[in-house]
Image (tube, rainbow, N blue to C red):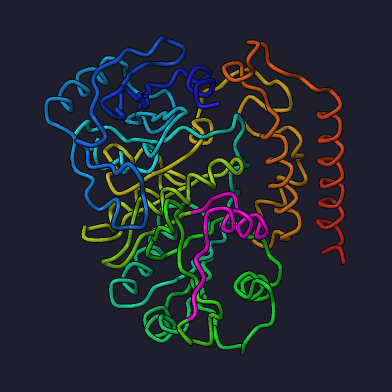
Amino acid sequence: MAQQIRSDNDLPTLRIVMERPSTGPVAVFQVTRGPRDPVTVGRISLRELGVPAVIDGADSVRSIGALPKALLLDLRSAVAGVGLSPSFPASALWLEIPAPRGYLYLLPWERLLAPLNRTLIRLPNYLLHPQAPGENLTVVIAVLDSGRSTEKAVLQLCSAWTKNSHRRVRIHVFADFLAFGSLRRSLGRVAEVTLHNPFPGASTEVDPWLTWISRSLGNIAVDVVQVLAPGTFTRDRGGVALPVQPGNWDGERQVVAGEELALFTTRLGAWCVALAATGRDSCVPALIEMADVLARSGPLVLLVQDLVGRSTGREMDRGVALVCGERSRVTEPLPATTCWVHPQFLGDGGGPADRGVDVDGTSTMVKSATTEMLGRADTPAWLAVGTRYLEGRQAGWLPTQAGSGTGEPLNDPEALDALGAVGRLLDRHAQITGREGPIR
């Protein structure tokens, strides 16, 4: 899909391709624009870069080094030749890492390639993108770490979402036992933020965090799920350690991987997931692995930000501006930000309307009343969840000329009709809800 998105939108692109000669795996760097044939610029052995043959825990990736200056100079010269991006921001250089990828996708290329002086954005895996938010934005911040640095990061994230999204923002913060006390003091006077009490008593629910959040919001949809946590690896799978019971601290935690987080966010109706690394022992590649799982699960907007050991307030602002704010402000590299987003979500471009995808890259199955309700401050969770399901199902069977094997896009009229029927049903309920209030 990435190749077709790059081609349809005429994007300046850096491809990083895995090759496996007898001397060991190598990363090959290629530049291209739109449908042009890629041109190889250089290569580097993964062993030289510090990438392990096998990842088995967070310590395995702490030795990842820097790219040689000569390679960076060659890449900078080659990248200048493919021009600026037609989609905002103009400084964007789109990153494509085709299969087989090995561990290439886990690397923080945004930091390693910052000397190119371009804003790196990873190409998504789906031809359509979720409906853009309306004038209202509901953000859930789940805080899974504690300490002064975490408290500061929460305040910065609240500021970033409220000041840079250019929308009416409401933020709901859910923190575990250890973080709640300090956050209650620091967030108590922030008008746009509600800090929820983690002490309702032990829950017998299968997923106490989802139950807690859903009940606290009164089944109102969520636009953005922001998770603030140290990343960790279980072998080579990224995850975050989640307290089993948010209000009953007994030290028991479970590691939640990308698949579980994808299900969690889908059940809240979110179109954007943001992961932020905190704590000295945090592992950013683990969070990138989680986000990559989410990127393959459906058409989402994704952010991973490294909040450890650097001045991050400005970059938080730019990250939020990139996905739902004034994108023209993003004119520089974001070395601590990994982002997956469809170019048409950011602005102009794209191919003709076809197979249920409109010219702006959204699904034509999502009708007008549904779109209007999604932009409200009190969007019912069931409507957002239904929309995300509809978009995900459609995105999953949309064809790709590059990957179809025959060179011809697939087209299933019966699938289009079925999705259209689901979209019309959702829209009918959205119309009823808009006139008469929530459906019971």
Q: Position of residue 324 (x, y in %)?
A: 48, 46
Residue at horizontal 41 percent and vertical 36 percent from the top: 102
Identity of the residue drawn at 59% across and 58% down: 260
Residue 355 picture quarter: top right
Specify whether 81 is left or right of 371: left
Report if residue 350 lies within the magenta region: no
x and y, in percent, of residue 201 in the image: 61, 90
Q: Which quadrant of the figure has residue 333?
A: top left
Q: Compared with residue 399, is residue 178 higher up or lower down, i.e. above or below? A: below
Q: Classify the position of the C terminus by image quarter.
A: bottom right
- Side of 78 where 294 appears, left or right: right
**Residue 41's x, y, as percent?**
25, 17
| Magenta highlight range | 252-273
Left or right of 75, for residue 172: right
Of the pair 16 and 149, the residue shown nearer to us: 16
Does residue 343 lie above or below 110 as drawn? above
**Residue pictured at 37% horizontal, 16% vertical:** 32
Q: Which residue is situated farthest in the front direction here?
A: 22
